[in-house]
Amino acid sequence: MMKFLPQQIIAPKKIAQALDYSEKINGLPFDPATETHIPQGKYSTTHYGVMIPNLPAPFNFLNLITVVGQPKVNLFHNQHLIKTSAIDTANVLVGTAIGNDDYFNGYSVKNDCELASNGSYLRFGNDLLLEGKYPHFHAKREGHDFNFELNIHATDKIAHFMRMPFGMYDHWALLCQYEGHLEYQGKKTQIQGLCTYEYARGIDIPLYMKYFTYQILNIDETTQVLLVEVLGPFNLVLQQRVYVRSINDHGAIYSKDFKLTVQSFEPERKITPNGLSMRLPRTFSWQVSDDQGQAVIAIEANSNQDFKYGMTGGYAGSYQYSGTFRGKTITGTGYIEYLDIRK
């Protein structure tokens, strides 16, 4: 970070809430009538995703990250994939720790994809099928070195990451249960647990972000913790939150005493296909407290060094962690998305 810049700038709460009122609607049950359409009308970009942490080795994690229509957000844009137009360009990351070569690809929406207008059927070439309507979804990949088939059952527990005025940008994640199998080089591994099903839509405007991380921990068979930190120009804090929810509880969001510290980075900077330079974390820690100042969660983390490019314009991977959650010792494999173009 440039030395003359403050470590962080925190905008007054009223201004922050005027730009993003997602905090006000968190804790409400998911509305089954919520739209999950592909780009249409004023919306030029949509995102569908499934994220699974805490998988057994050698997989560690699985993410299915799809973007339909290239966003103007510099951090999330993949200019090198555009062959016709931005709105005709989709990209898919099928990320896991194994070394498959075909995990990230771009597509022409018109020529390579089959996308139902309401988002209930999404086929991206021969690489990914994501289909279904709330609360039941199905994900499948076949014909590759790495394949899978998953049945996903959504709860009504939803984390709203952002809700901007006039519908400019919405982004949310449902807490889900899944079961199915992974297949690598012909060998099947049965899996089950908690995951997220995510959707976002945005209009064609630039959002100026310099740093973004999103992390997922499955604390136990029913409880999930999400961390989001977003910084803009001059290290302006756009969001610092930890979301806690469970199968039987809508949970809460926490920001008091939020602190995420990277102790060490990978030795070499990564240069993305779009020419962005960023450092990826090797060891880090984070924590947050409730409104009374009592610790909610605190962890120490070590990257598994399995970052894959394609989390839009950045990287996703996993890490081993240990720490405490509401006073109890926890360990596991967390999921991390990370983008940082600060100097």
Image (cartoon, rainbow, N blue to C red):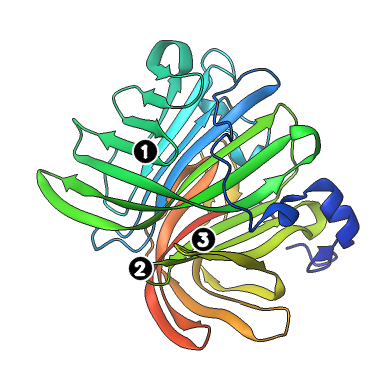
The mark closer to the camera, 3 or 1, is: 1
Residue 106 sits in quarter: top left
Q: Residue at x 49, y 25 (%)?
A: 90
Q: Amino acid at mark 1?
A: Phe
CB under 8 Å between callouts 3 and 2?
A: no
The mark closer to the camera, 3 or 2, is: 2
Separation of residues labelled 1 and 2 (CA atoms): 20 Å
Question: Does residue 43 sit above or below 221 in this rendering?
Answer: above
Mark 3, residues whose alpha carbon is within 10 Å: few (<14), some, or many (≥20)?
Answer: many
Q: Residue at x 65, y 86 (%)?
A: 294
Q: Secondary structure at mark 1?
A: strand
Q: Which residue is mark 3?
A: 215
Q: Is residue 260 left or right of residue 102?
A: right
Position of residue 325 measured from the top left corner of the image (x, y, whole percent): 50, 81
Mark 2, residues whose alpha carbon is within 10 Å: few (<14), some, or many (≥20)?
Answer: few
Nearest to the observer: residue 120 or residue 312? 120
Q: Which mark is residue 137?
A: 1
Position of residue 69 measured from the top left corner of the image (x, y, whole percent): 57, 24
Separation of residues labelled 3 and 1 (CA atoms): 22 Å
Nearest to the observer: residue 303 or residue 199? 199
Q: Secondary structure at mark 2?
A: loop
Residue 124 visible in this rendered orientation of the protein = yes
Q: Amino acid at mark 2?
A: Glu
Q: Which residue is mark 2?
A: 221
Mark 1 vs 2, N-terminal side: 1
Q: Is residue 281 left or right of residue 179?
A: right
